[in-house]
Image (cartoon, rainbow, N blue to C red):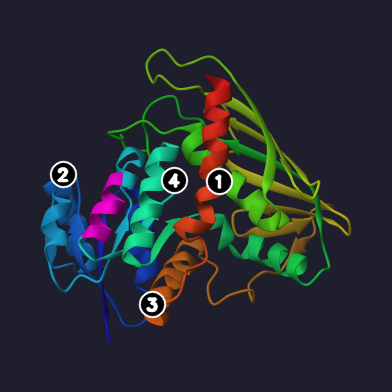
Amino acid sequence: MTLKIALAGAGAFGIKHLDGLKNIADVEVVSLIGRELGKTQEVADKYGIGHVTTNLADTLAIKEVDAVILCTPTQMHAEQSVACMKAGKHVQMEIPLADSLAGAQSVDAMQKQTGLVAMCGHTRRFNPSHQWVRNKIVAGEFNIQQMDVQTFFFRRTNMNALGQARSWTDHLLWHHAAHTVDLFAYQARSPIVKANAVQGPIHPALGIAMDMSIQLKAANGAICTLSLSFNNDGPLGTFFRYIGDTGTYIARYDDLVNGKEEKIDVSQVDVSMNGIELQDREFIAAIREGREPNSSVAQVLPCYEVLHQLEQQLA
């Protein structure tokens, strides 16, 4: 049976999901929701999507829609996720789950009430480079002693990954730190018990800190140091150094090298090298199999509890 998907948010990440979904059998994107009708129609025409709207409620009223993928601004994620489940639709929201702990908890509560699949796009769990490390950890061949992570952008205006103007402001803590806070606990296989943060000056126009440093400690003793910046003029992206008891590994998106910069082949780790596609495959498989997905709202909620603690510290 073909699964009917709606996608909200026709920007840079929405397009990444559309490209990933094309590779998954028995899936059809039947509705596209965007902020500007003309631009959304252009994307819909390119991907053969029949229904276009600027109102999520219009899509939720379509009975044949089984599930919704939300690639909308951060501030909308919690409210829209709850609305999707109230309408009886499974939902995958892009990271972050919410921009507050209360928002994250409201999504978790609605999932428990409805029993629907609710999954958050913590893509690092799915990137083949991180899966390779995870497989060694689960096999007992590698244990993390320290993770050193850099999340660096040059972004002093509201621009998306395609260099287009955004209607909303990104956030180092609630968006970009969420990737690493969740991944550290997931890979350490141990909850975070201590977290500290400091941040640089607040940008006068954007109203956010442009630089931040975070320290984490897991119950099993592993530690993590995370540096984040919107001021860094290259190289750009997030770079993860895993320092363990039997080796050192550096993950750069879907590429992996050891501590001596020798390339590790991760092409056979999963059915694709595309982390977003693998994330969508897990969402669809969980719906079909009636099970909790990896990166479910319940699984990632502790990450947002830590982010809340850090926000209180920074305040």
Give the amino acid at mark 4: Pro
Q: Secondary structure at mark 3?
A: loop
Frontmost of labels 2 and 4 is 4
Q: Quadrant of residue 140?
A: bottom right
Q: Earlier in the sequence, mark 4 or mark 1?
A: 4
**Which range of residues does the magenta coloring cover?**
79-86
Q: Earlier in the sequence, mark 2 or mark 1?
A: 2
Q: Is residue 203 magenta?
A: no
Q: Secondary structure at mark 1?
A: helix
Give the amino acid at mark 3: Ile
Q: Secondary structure at mark 4?
A: loop
Residue hosting label 1: 303
Q: Are discs 2 and 1 less than 8 Å apart at CB?
A: no
Residue for point 40% across, 19% down: 207
x, y (%) of residue 228? 59, 32
Residue for point 50% across, 22% down: 209
Give the amino acid at mark 2: Glu
Residue hosting label 2: 36
193 on left or right of 126:
right
Q: Which mark is residue 96?
A: 4
Determine whether 97 is above or below 225 in the image: below
Seen from the viewer's position, the closer of residues 161 and 135 is 135
Residue hosting label 3: 24
Q: Magenta stretch mostly in which secondary structure?
A: helix
Residue for point 38% across, 80% down: 288
Q: Mark 3: give few (<14), some (14-19) or many (20+) Cα within 10 Å.
A: some
Residue for point 54% across, 36% down: 307
